[in-house]
Image (spheres, helix red, strand yellow):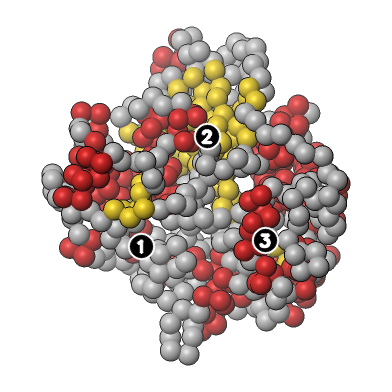
Amino acid sequence: MKFSPHWPALSLSLLLVGGAAFAADGSTKNVPASAAHGQIQLRPGHAAIASANFHATNAGLEVLAKGGNAFDAAIAVASTLSVVEPESSGMGGGFMAVLHRAKDGHDFFIDAREAAPAAVDSKDYLNADGTPNRDASLKGPLSSGIPGEPAGLVLLSKRYGRLPLSASLAPAIRIARDGFQPDARLREAIADERKNLQRWPASAAKYLTDGKPPADGATWRDPDQAHTWELIATHGDDGFYRGETADKLIAAVHAAGGRWTLADLAAYKAKERTPIIVNYHGFRIITAPPPSSGGVAIAEILNILSGFDLTKLDEPHRVHFIIEAMRRAFRDHNDYLGDPDFVKMPLDMLLSPFYADGLRQSILPDKATPSSMLPAAEAAEPGMHTTHFSIIDADGNMVAITSTVNYVLGSTFVASGTGVLLNDEMDDFALVPNEPNVYGLLGSVANAPKGGKRMLSSMSPSIVIGADRTAVIGSPGGSTIITQVLEGILAFVDGESAQQIAAHKRFHHQYMPDEVDVEEGTFDPATSDALTKMGYNLKPRESWGFMNVVTWNRKTNKLDAASDPRRPSGLGKVQ
């Protein structure tokens, strides 16, 4: 990796470029009845992408300009983020995707979540006294699950893309080879993790120069990652999970004490699953199924809230009912959910409106319910550093992808000769039942580690379709992903724009600890006082996710794209 101080400065702005609308293509499946009578546009005729980095957004638009669809553009965005935003996602991590194909109304979900190696041993993650060893679960190859992103992108290209995989990966390969200017967020992440990066020679070589992070204005090149993407472009899955890259990954992991095998890599498959669909006050929400916990929790919360008209409540009571719904959903999240290929989950119960009715009845009208007072769920025996992007293309195909390496710069371990920064997703397992992970989430035996099993995730990519408005939405943020996406959905239902949704002030409750995290400015003093009197412990929180939203008004045929204003490196762009 080489740096140069002479890279030209690039300005960042929200760029809106209008496009002509085309006639509807006649497809009416899964579209509100009014659309079939010509009142609603079925095809926008132009495209919009919102991602966390302008290089990635522009890569997606480049692929669309070559004739690609939203699914090809998603491959370009994800692979470019691997190069320019490694603190949040990358080829050494995984993703979850909620997608909509316009020509037949097909809604589908791709599970490219990481998986535990066959030789996983919970004892590796324990201190001598039986407490969690956070260094083992967060740093180095023991913390890493088998990556899913390469397989997920290959699957997306094969089944749904329009262009060759090599065309969709071309921007990422070019940027990795030619170089780019690291933004302040990446430089700060490298500075924060410098001591951990120095523990492994390949990590230090990739991210540090003379032991220091890249300077402002330097050029960063990553030829090893470019080569690995080229192998994937040429050979598909075999370019990563077998052959040259696989051999290098296993050699590096074993040399540093990890437990991966060539068989683990060869056995990994991205999976297509049925998304969760819930209706809320006339809107159809398509969201992520397990091994995401987010979709189940969002659906459960919305089912509870469907019994209230939130628009007729004063602000303290509106927030009160939302928090209580969050509390109950996270209680179930902790105890019931896991990898559906390993754990039998009572999803019919959790997603039932009748179950939600019972939970709603347990909410007191003017008083917080202490989490300790809720009955324990009886489970069957068995990043803030993530990224999200949203896409709608000219045909109306939609992509909501949340991708992650878990914590800042994942495990901080780079496999020599590959450019692959490994994730630290093993911490998302319940390595010690009922002990919190790095995000404070509890877990049960349903999310205990086992070879080949996928760890539970909070990733909640979602698509929201109303009578005449559509949104593609998601966010990073660890355990707050679920509540941030929920609040984004509620804001969209209330009529807010993409920019308003991305900027919306946020609050969060996750059952335990029994406190409400609140962003500064979310509540006025009167609301804060009223909530405190109801029994809520309000706790200021500075760190929130990086939401990226695309909306489509199908009456006016207007697309809008917005990146979270809390961070300046993102770009929402309409083409």
Whole-number angstrom distance, CA of label 1 to CA of label 2: 28 Å
Residue at 38 percent across and 32 percent down: it is 491
Vertical arrangement, residue 351 with respect to residue 123, above or below? above
Residue 358 in view here: no
Identify the mark nearer the N-term, 1 or 2: 1
Amino acid identity at mark 3: Ile
SS of the residue under disc 1: helix
Real-space CA distance between mark 3 and mark 2, rounded to the nearest whole angstrom: 27 Å
Q: Residue 182, how many percent across, how many down?
A: 73, 49
**Residue 372, percent from left and from top:** 21, 65
Image quadrant where residue 60 sits:
top right
Numbered label attached to residue 7? none
- Residue position marked by numbered label 2 in the rendering: 549
- Which residue sits at x=80%, y=51%? 218
Residue that mark 3 sits on: 190
Q: Secondary structure at mark 3?
A: helix
The image quadrant where one finds the N terminus is: bottom right
In terms of image quadrants, where is residue 101? top right
Within-10-Å neighbours for mark 3: few <14, some 14–19, many 20+:
many
Q: Amino acid at mark 1?
A: Asn
The kind of residue on which mark 2 rests is: Val
Closer to the eye: label 3 or 2: 3
Q: Nearer the viewer, residue 283 or 36?
A: 283
Q: Nearer the observer, disc 1 or disc 3?
A: 3
Left or right position of 417 against 68: right
Label 2 SS: strand
Q: Give the percent coordinates (x, y) of residue 448.
A: 45, 71
- Residue position for label 1: 334
- Which residue is at 69% across, 47% downward? 183
Query: Taking 151 as reference, is 315 left or right?
Result: left
- The residue located at (39%, 73%) in the rendering is 435
